[in-house]
Image (cartoon, rainbow, N blue to C red):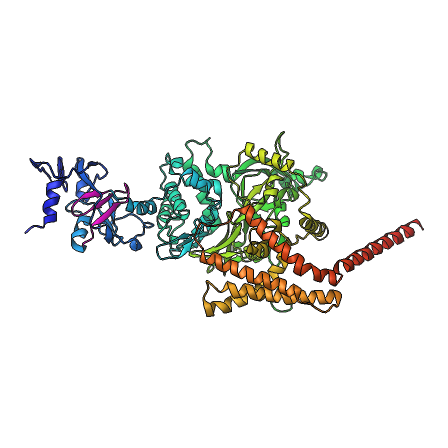
Amino acid sequence: MKSKREESSRTTTTTVNEEDNGNESLKRQKKSEPPAVALPLAYDDDDENDDDDESNQESHTHRVVQVRRDCPYLDTVNRQWLDFDFERFCSVSMSNLNVYACLVCGKYFQGRGNKSHAYTHSLEAGHHVYINLRTEKVYCLPDGYEINDPSLDDIRHVLNPRFTTQQIQQLDKNKQWSRTLDGSDYLPGMVGLNNISNTDFVNVTIQSLMRVTPLRNFFLIPDNYQHSKSPLVHQFGELTRKIWHSRNFKGQVSPHEFLQAVMKASKKKFRIGAQSDPVEFMAWLLNTLHADLRTSKKDTSIISKCFQGELEVVKEVPNKALIEKKENGEGQNTDGVSKRSIFVSETKRSPFLMLGLDLPPPPLFKDVMEKNIIPQVHMSAILKKFDGETITEVVRPHVARMRYRVTRLPQYLIFHMRRFTKNNFFMEKNPTLVTFPVKNLELKDYMPLPTPKENEKLRSKYDLIANIVHDGKPAEGYYRAFVQRKSEELWYEIQDLHVSETLPHMKKHDLLRHVAVAVVVLKYKGLTAKDQLKVFPCIVVGVSKTEYLKIEEEEEARPNKYGRRNLQLDAAVVSAVARALLGLDLEPQFDEPYLSTSLQDFWGRRWNLMVTSILRPTVYDPVLNFSSRLIGRKWAPLPAVLGTFIVSALMHELIFYHFGRVRPTWEISLFFLLHGVCLTAEIALKKALKGRSWQLPRPIAIVLTIGFVMVTGVSLFFPQIIRCRAIERALHEYAALGAFVKNGVGLLTTRSFN
């Protein structure tokens, strides 16, 4: 007995010149009576190989397939099992031709004809809904009709993420969290990448390149690179779209298909299971993408537009003729020859995508405590390599003296510190600490730069946007990346699947402490407009010259633009003096607190950053770790924040008692406790509303935040300052210091006259 479903499917499905499995052609006659319901028909021209590999050798005619919306098996679709990150090969035949995914169990099968693996699976397992991984069409097997239902659009978006121009423009403004099928939250663009056996060097490279906004925007639209036939280009674009997709079923992405394309393109130089250097991989990846995206040798690509600069290289090779004459005693007349004339000089200009910085060698001996001395060097010291005067001696491919000078800066500058050196016995890692400003790295202070043309400004100020670090021994360690999320001006630490928030001024030394490569990606910023806008770190993408000049005009027309920066100007003056006298960069004390949009933003990221950096490791982190064992990681920050404010209140009471020797009135303690309770409530509210779209407009949030701080400060904080006469005492100390300097100058002047 045949089921009614099979009989109805035979009466409603019409086929024209259909070949069954490439063996014979079966023709079915139409019914003389029309069906009771008119069903739409569509040509099935997407399946060239419906069944097995035997059909590849014979021609396949187009079939007319019934299209339906009412499929009784849609409720069997299980999105929890769907994973489109892996290679699209049939799980039975291992063929990549005409592959379908079962939407019930998630397995891949080839074809959908009567002898195909998908057809067999539908009969054996009772799984009836399949999607073509290339055309995104959904079919019901074994009936064979196409399903056109809007409820399957979310699966199509996960299979092939799509972005519109408007959505791309909002990526750097979006503060919303996305939610996965299991209820967990994730940030689009800040998703973890699966480590497929020692592939962390690929993960950190991808995470860093995702912060380069022009590169990201380019690869989010497949039409931009449709002309390229390189699988590496298309897999990189697909991986980019998956990382920034806000409708993923899970909060992580597996770069499996991209790694397969990398192995094939690099001829297994970079492969799964073998650890490699992120510097070598990034250099290879950028050069390969650049070559595959160009249509001719003279064309540029998005890679060259973002990263390519120009370097002047002066190569000095020893003059063998003069040296041989001097050694043979024939150089009596060469004594007056200058030392530099012994070398033959050759000057050329070459493009670069990244700059390598040489670190000073580590000390050979231990200190008195029998511990290795870890030296520390400022960025300015190692940047002297590119001042055009410092000589770098090389021995490969032959002995020469090199001098480098940057003649054109790129929009995004990539530095890498060479920490790994290999000798005949083992590989060494240089542990030297490199300190540099996270914001506003002014290159013109460290190296000579070309004079800009007329009507152009010199763009030489850069901000950090990503950094790759290495922990552990050279051959056994692992890599992690520090990246910045532009929409909230926050920093995140990403190690494979683990993504956690961190603060730039807290982790500044972590950024470079155990760096194997220190692939530092910097974005240049303007001299005036970008400084005022304070996009930290600045990743403004696609800013045309007209738009930039418009920003400059608006900034120049703004009245009293320096009146609001007294605190920062004072700190900047002290920092400039320290840099001039000691060659050191001081930590920033404030970060525009008048732009705070919440109490968390005010206390955690903008106000008195030095105190924050002290209280976090000493109070906040211990309480956080202890609370995590009691109430869980999600709500552990609440008691940690409240405990930090309690310690800060007691600390301020002690400071003011030391100033004035006045009996405390506990008003300052009340001020900090009030802010601690309010900040705790704010964090709890944010956690409860995470992923929802409701938020205050930025101007209103700034007014409410600063207003609350000012009202509570005037009523609770400043009375104690006035009561202990702190301002008056400070003025007396400044006057005494001025008198001391004046007397000292007068004494020196008198002695000089005598």
Q: Position of residue 2 (x, y in %)?
A: 7, 50
Residue at horizontal 74 percent and vertical 68 percent from the top? 662
- Which stretch did the figure color magenta? 126-147
* Left or right side of 19 for 614: right
Say which quarter of the image contains residue 679: bottom right
Q: Position of residue 624 (x, y in %)?
A: 51, 66
User: Is 610 placed above or below 535 here?
Assistant: below
Report if residue 400 is visible in the image.
Answer: no
Residue at horizontal 65 percent and vertical 57 percent from the top? 713
Say which quarter of the image contains residue 399: top right
The residue sitting at the right extreme is 754
Task: Return the residue nearer the eye: 620 or 435.
Answer: 620
User: Is 408 placed above or below 741 here?
Assistant: above
* Left or right side of 265 for 686: right
* Left or right side of 649 for 1: left
Task: Return the residue nearer the eye: 610 or 638.
Answer: 638
